[in-house]
Image: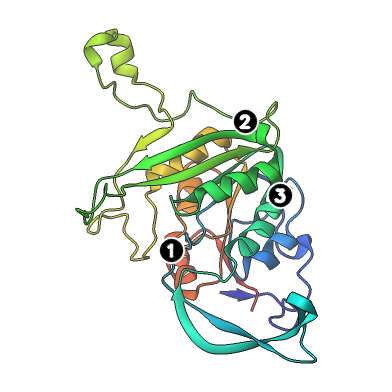
Amino acid sequence: MTAIPGAGGAGGTPPLPAGGLWAPDGPDLVVEADNARVLAALPDGAFTMVYIDPPFNTGRAQKRHETTVVRAASGDRVGFSGQRYETIKGALHRYDDAFSDYWAFLEPRLVEAWRVLAEDGTLYLHLDYREVHYAKVMLDAVFGRDCFLNEIIWAYDYGARTKRRWPTKHDNVLVYVKDPQRYHFDSEQVDREPYMAPGLVTPEKRALGKLPTDVWWHTIVSPTGREKTGYPTQKPEGLLRRMVTASSRPGDWVLDFFAGSGTLGAAAAALDRRFVCVDENPQAIEVMARRLPSARVLSLG
């Protein structure tokens, strides 16, 4: 792994200039860093496609401080009847995949995603039912409602089933474009699906298959399959292959700044696209270094 001199760490070190991290004729990259720093170092309009699969805010293991508010004459807040209050950090509690203000965390990164997209570029934001409705409102504000292209439903059928409600077996992917008049979408190259009623179409259509709709039936990564990396939130390569094929061309750059196991990079490499994958989890970087051997692996320290 290559450490970038002067990349710095805590303490407010400014991000690298774009030329020190990424170049259009440079190598594919796997970057270990806070994605906010990496995004700030990337130039405008560099990527034809951005895919992100951020934490889902499910309310399980990350650390945060519980806060309490008490009356204090010199407090930092003013409340009812002019009373002043002081904010006190309380006991440390553990959460996993939760943020004290999830959207304050995600929104500036979505604004940066818009900035680094090319004029014909597309964003795929992968979430689930807990946050997708909030994300839709936020992306309408960041991109504009006319830039909304699709909501893709990824449906699967695996795992435990509750008997107290309808079992949840799908994720949501919001698709937004930078410019609704110019975005790239290649329906001819996308993998086809079999017709559900093949007897109702011609033999030629049956042989070709049909263009996928906005509901994608695809199994999860098999626990015993060759694709399995061991990373807990790994997504199937087939999902990313379809997105990359539709929304980029050979030679285009694609970006994932919550890269996890590096599935976007794997799909991009197989399809002759260039990629930048960013994650601050050392386990993710180790997985991607093995999975994406052609990439340069950098650490911003």
- Above/below status of 265 relative to 124: below
Q: Is residue 261 left or right of residue 207?
A: right
- Above/below status of 95 relative to 152: below
Q: Tell me the CA gap for discs 2 and 3.
A: 16 Å
Q: Position of residue 42 (x, y in %)?
A: 73, 57
Query: Residue 205 occupies which quadrant of the picture?
Result: top left
Q: Quadrant of the N terminus?
A: bottom right
Q: Position of residue 45 (x, y in %)?
A: 74, 45
- Above/below status of 236 relative to 288: above
Q: Tell me the CA gap for discs 2 and 1.
A: 33 Å
Q: Earlier in the sequence, mark 2 or mark 1?
A: 1
Q: Residue at x 73, y 91 (%)?
A: 72
Query: Residue 76 occupies which quadrant of the picture?
Result: bottom right
Residue type at mark 1: give it: Thr
Of circles 1 and 3, which is in front?
Answer: 1
- In this rendered view, identify the residue nearer to me: 283 or 52: 52
Residue type at mark 2: give it: His
Q: Residue at x 29, y 21 (%)?
A: 195
Q: Which residue is mark 1?
A: 58
Q: Position of residue 251 (x, y in %)?
A: 61, 41
C-beta proximity under 8 Å, tags 2 and 3: no
- In this rendered view, identify the residue nearer to me: 83 or 218: 83
Residue type at mark 3: give it: Val
Q: Residues within 10 Å of mark 2 (few under 14, many from 20)?
A: some
Q: Tell me the CA gap for discs 1 and 3.
A: 28 Å
